[in-house]
């Protein structure tokens, strides 16, 4: 009981303890890296990226051909 | 804390990516390989089909090989492009691509969590997962059904734009409802979800598919099921790790700076 309550409170402080600017920086970094990875694996037209990720693209529902 | 976000995202991505790759290996890839055996019959050109045509041509025109050499060389230039070898190499690349895409999705929802100020926890990780599934799998698939090699499809760029736009609008709807459940928010969210489907996904040309229907339906169902597993694993593991890191962070005495 106590444990779950503590966890919830601590988790809330995990995000809330960050200042707005820290959150924006972390978010911007994660967004840029995440989008780069998604474009590379799911969308890039380069044939090496396309052929390497071919089956994964089909399996994850990205438009492929 | 930024390190924690990236660590949680990447470990969750590894778990979700590997779990997905395992399901893909046994249930999804066999369907892709099977579909590829029909590819080329429906007029869709692909590397392997082109190779087969070229070799056939060489055999048939054996006597006139000299004059046809140049033509064969130019037409086989495209099929020469690199692709992983069938078997272990192909599986390895598929697994790698799944893990990297998982990392991309994890960092993306991590970024949204940071911007929106909504933590990803073990308690709500399930909901993050459901939202991710609806945003990136179900909504795009509603307009662009999961596609096997060899199936007729519209212009690639147009489909990619529609896919990304639909994910963006649907994700925005999920985020809006997570922030506020006012009645105007419901109206806006419904509009965001519906508009891409009113605009409509780029249509496939009206030509017969080379791929048998039972393969295509099995593929659509299996990939959506796999995507659900992927997103639930990603959301819950991401949330669990965030909880663990937050507890560890809180356990450090207040005076200690790291």
Image (cartoon, rainbow, N blue to C red):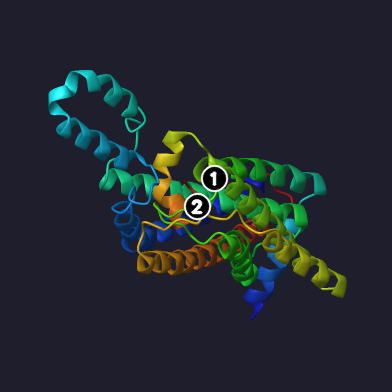
Q: Quadrant of residue B197?
A: bottom right
Quick one: B8 or B87, which is closer to the camera? B87
What element does badge 1 sit on?
helix
- Image coordinates for residue B151, horizontal then vertical, percent: 43, 55
Q: Residue at coordinates 87% horizontally, 71% vertically from top-left?
A: B184
Disc 1 residue crowd, few under 14, some 14–19, many 20+, Cα 10 Å: some
Give the residue number, with chain letter if any, for mark 2: B153
Q: Extreme left residue here?
A: B63
Indicate the chain on which mark 2 is placed. Answer: B
Q: Residue at coordinates 65% horizontally, 62% vertically from top-left?
A: B120
**Are the two marked residues, 2 and 1, in contact with CB atoms closer than 8 angstroms?**
yes
- For this view, does A18 lie left or right of residue B42? right
> Is B90 located above or below residue B227 in the figure?
above
What element does badge 2 sit on?
loop
Give the residue number, with chain letter if any, for mark 1: B156
- Image coordinates for residue B150, horizontal then vertical, percent: 39, 52
Disc 2 residue crowd, few under 14, some 14–19, many 20+, Cα 10 Å: many
Q: Extreme bottom residue here?
A: A1
Query: In the rendered view of the protein, which quadrant contains the C terminus of chain B?
Result: top right
How many numbered marks have been drawn onto this rendered protein structure? 2
Q: Quadrant of residue B66?
A: top left
Indicate the chain on which mark 1 is placed. Answer: B
Q: Residue at coordinates 40% horizontally, 50% vertically from top-left?
A: A55
- Image coordinates for residue B255, horizontal then vertical, percent: 74, 50
């Amino acid at each position: 009981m106590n444990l779950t309550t503590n966890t919830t409170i601590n988790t809330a402080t995990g995000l809330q303890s960050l200042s707005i600017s820290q959150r924006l920086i972390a978010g911007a970094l994660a967004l840029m890296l995440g989008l780069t990875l998604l474009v590379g694996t799911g969308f890039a037209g380069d044939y090496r990226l396309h052929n390497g990720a071919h089956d994964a693209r089909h399996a994850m529902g990205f438009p492929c051909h | 804390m930024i390190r924690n976000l990236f660590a949680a995202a990447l470990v969750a991505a590894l778990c979700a990516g590997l779990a997905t790759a395992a399901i893909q290996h046994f249930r999804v890839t066999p369907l892709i390989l099977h579909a590829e055996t029909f590819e080329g019959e429906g007029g869709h050109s692909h590397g392997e089909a082109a190779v087969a045509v070229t070799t056939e041509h060489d055999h048939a025109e054996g006597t006139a090989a000299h004059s046809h050499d140049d033509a064969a060389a130019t037409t086989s230039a495209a099929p020469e492009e690199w692709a992983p070898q069938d078997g272990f190499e192909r599986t390895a690349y598929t697994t790698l691509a799944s893990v990297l895409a998982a990392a991309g999705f994890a960092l993306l929802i991590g970024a949204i969590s940071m911007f929106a100020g909504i933590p990803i926890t073990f308690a709500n990780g399930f909901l993050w997962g459901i939202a991710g599934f609806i945003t990136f799998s179900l909504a795009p698939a509603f307009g662009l059904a999961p596609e096997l090699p060899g199936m007729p499809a519209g212009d690639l760029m147009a489909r990619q734009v529609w896919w990304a736009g639909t994910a963006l609008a649907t994700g925005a709807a999920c985020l809006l409802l997570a922030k506020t459940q006012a009645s105007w928010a419901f109206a806006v969210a419904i509009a965001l979800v519906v508009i891409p489907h009113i605009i409509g996904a780029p249509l496939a040309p009206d030509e017969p598919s080379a791929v048998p229907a039972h393969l295509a339906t099995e593929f659509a169902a299996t990939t959506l099921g796999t995507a659900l597993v992927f997103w639930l694993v990603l959301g819950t593991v991401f949330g669990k790790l965030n909880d663990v890191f937050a507890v560890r962070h809180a356990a450090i005495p207040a005076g200690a700076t790291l």
